[in-house]
């Protein structure tokens, strides 16, 4: 990526090194585009590099690494906060489960061939919706792909670029969440 001569090669290399280090430290950063993180960090550095004071006995590279680390920590905290907010967001039972307007809804995922009075069914839909909100975005995607998408475990592994054991662990976590809420019978 060409930054029009705004940065020296050591500045770009330092930012890349710190980003790689922090992507290992913060899982939420792994889901973000490397180039987007690099750009965010370089813009932050551009704003603050004039504040470098050589009399403080730190090299300019060390100062830059500190600036980039703080920026990445802010980004990671924001991503974590955004993830926590989704727990409190309501979802309509009639809203499609993915971006396709013809996709099945959460309401469609609840089997209709049960002998449950309508009030209990309504309560059940609310409970399933609440449990669904407790899932991470990755777990929700996994449910959609395996449930309605009809993907196999191997296909899900390829889709998420994860090892088979990781996908099985996620499925186990999803089952645990449903089981804790007494909804074990509604898992496929």
Image: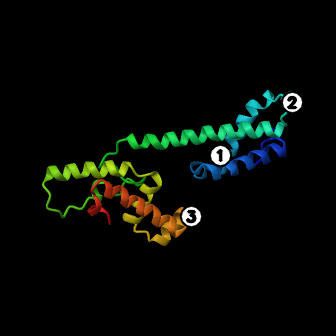
Rounded to the nearest angstrom, the CA distance separating label 2 from label 3 is 44 Å
User: Is residue 62 or residue 151 the one in the foreground?
Assistant: 62
Can the viewer see residue 140? yes
Asked whether disc 3 touches disc 1, contact meaning CB atoms under 8 Å apart, the reply is: no
Q: What element carries label 2?
A: helix
Q: Which of marks 1 and 2 is in front?
A: 2
Which residue has dot 3 on it?
Answer: 161
Query: Residue 50 appears in which quarter of the rendering?
Result: top right
- In screen coordinates, is 179 left or right of 81? left
Where residue 158 appears, x then y in whole percent? 54, 67
Q: What element carries label 3?
A: loop
Where residue 169 appears, x then y in whole percent? 46, 63
Is 18 above or below relative to 145?
above
Query: Residue 178 appears in which quarter of the rendering?
Result: bottom left
Which residue has dot 2 on it?
Answer: 54
Asked whether disc 2 touches disc 3, contact meaning CB atoms under 8 Å apart, the reply is: no
3 or 1: tag closer to the N-terminus: 1
User: Is residue 40 or residue 102 the one in the foreground?
Assistant: 40
Is 134 above or below relative to 168?
above
Is 156 above or below relative to 54?
below
Which residue has dot 1 on it?
Answer: 36
Q: What element carries label 1?
A: helix
Residue that appears at 80% across and 42% down: 11
Label tally = 3
Where residue 8 appears, x then y in whole percent? 84, 42
Query: Residue 147 appears in which quarter of the rendering?
Result: bottom left
Residue that appears at 20% across and 49% down: 122
Rounded to the nearest angstrom, the CA distance separating label 3 from label 1 is 20 Å
Which quarter of the rendering shows the C terminus?
bottom left
Circle 1 packing at 10 Å, graded few (<14), some (14-19), many (20+), is few
1 or 2: tag closer to the N-terminus: 1
């Amino acid at each position: 990526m060409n930054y029009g001569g705004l940065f020296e090669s050591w500045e770009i290399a330092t930012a890349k090194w710190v980003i790689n280090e922090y992507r290992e430290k913060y899982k939420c950063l792994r889901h973000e585009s490397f180039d987007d993180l690099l750009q965010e960090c370089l813009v932050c550095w551009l704003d603050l590099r004039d504040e470098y004071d050589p009399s403080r006995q730190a090299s300019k590279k060390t100062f830059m690494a500190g600036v980039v680390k703080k920026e990445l920590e802010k980004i990671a905290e924001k991503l974590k906060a955004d993830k926590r907010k989704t727990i409190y967001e309501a979802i309509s039972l009639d809203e499609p489960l993915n971006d396709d307007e013809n996709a099945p809804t959460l309401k469609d995922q609840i089997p209709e061939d049960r002998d449950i009075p309508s009030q209990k069914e309504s309560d059940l839909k609310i409970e399933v919706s609440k449990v669904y909100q407790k899932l991470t975005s990755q777990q929700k995607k996994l449910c959609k792909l395996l449930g309605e998408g009809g993907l196999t475990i191997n296909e899900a592994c390829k889709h998420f670029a994860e090892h088979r054991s990781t996908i099985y662990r996620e499925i186990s976590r999803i089952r645990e969440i449903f089981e804790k809420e007494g909804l074990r019978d509604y898992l496929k």
